[in-house]
Amino acid sequence: MKQEHYFSKKPVSWLKVKEISETIRGFPVTLKLGSGTFSAKKIDPGSRLLAAAMQIKKNDSILDLGCGTGIVGIIAAKLTKSDVLLTDINKRACMLAKENSKGISNISVVCGNMYEKAQGKFDVILLNPPQTAGKDVCFQMIEEAKEHLNPNGSLQLVARHTKGGKTLSRHMKEVFGNLDVLAKKGGYRVYISVNN
């Protein structure tokens, strides 16, 4: 059977849940991961690097776009006093993200495609783009980030530099007019563009 794509609304595979415990940025977290979602067996190295390197100020409002089971948004919520919105197209990922973020008062999770449920503007948009969904989807996420960011807000994106990251980072620079690298590890880079 062909492996199901995590960038789908309703995974049809049997749900197998795996619980893991990790410490990221000094915060212990317990996560439920599930089949039919992105990185179903462990925290993806890109998401781990983004969670470790993202720049969050204590009053930043945050959108974790394509949140998966929620690790990046959960760590972000511990760094800000403001609201953190997690959104994903995958209903199973949203269900697990809700479960994983229970008890964290400044997180809300909504299910929707890209920005369709992201009301208002944010100080930070965090993105581990669904590269297997194709370049057009990833480019659209970058382009639409601009209209969902406050002035001086930032898009912070993680990707493998040699596997699409170069192309995505170039597009970030085209859209925003600026680009920096926040972190590099294991072939991954965290890129940041500011909405000047």
Image: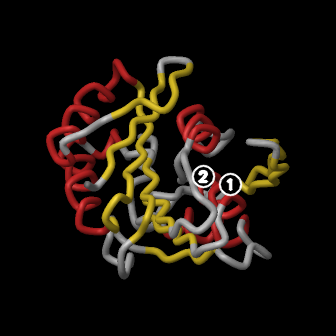
- The residue under label 1 is which amino acid type? Ile
Name the residue beneath numbered marker 1: 75
- The residue under label 2 is which amino acid type? Val
Residue 165 horizontal side relative to residue 75, left or right? left
Of residues 9 and 43, the one nearer the viewer is: 43
Mark 2 burial class by Cα count in 10 Å: few <14, some 14-19, many 20+: many
Picture quadrant of residue 1? top left
- Mark carried by residue 72: 2
Picture quadrant of residue 165? top left
Of residues 10 and 171, the one nearer the viewer is: 171
* Quadrant position of the C terminus in the picture: bottom left
Residue 9 horizontal side relative to residue 177, left or right? right
Q: Position of residue 185 (x, y in %)?
A: 55, 21
Circles 1, 2 touching at the beta carbon (< 8 Å): yes
Judge whether residue 14 can be spotted in this image: no
Residue drawn where x is 65% and y is 40% of the image:
43
- Mark carried by residue 63: none
Residue drawn where x is 74% and y is 56% of the image:
32
Give the vertical position of 158 relative to 186 (above or below): below
Residue drawn where x is 50% and y is 77% of the image:
110
Residue 96 horizontal side relative to residue 133, left or right? right
Q: Position of residue 53 (x, y in %)?
A: 58, 38
Q: Position of residue 64 (x, y in %)?
A: 49, 60
Give the vertical position of 117 relative to 132 (above or below): below
Q: Position of residue 77 (x, y in %)?
A: 66, 64
Mark 1 burial class by Cα count in 10 Å: few <14, some 14-19, many 20+: many
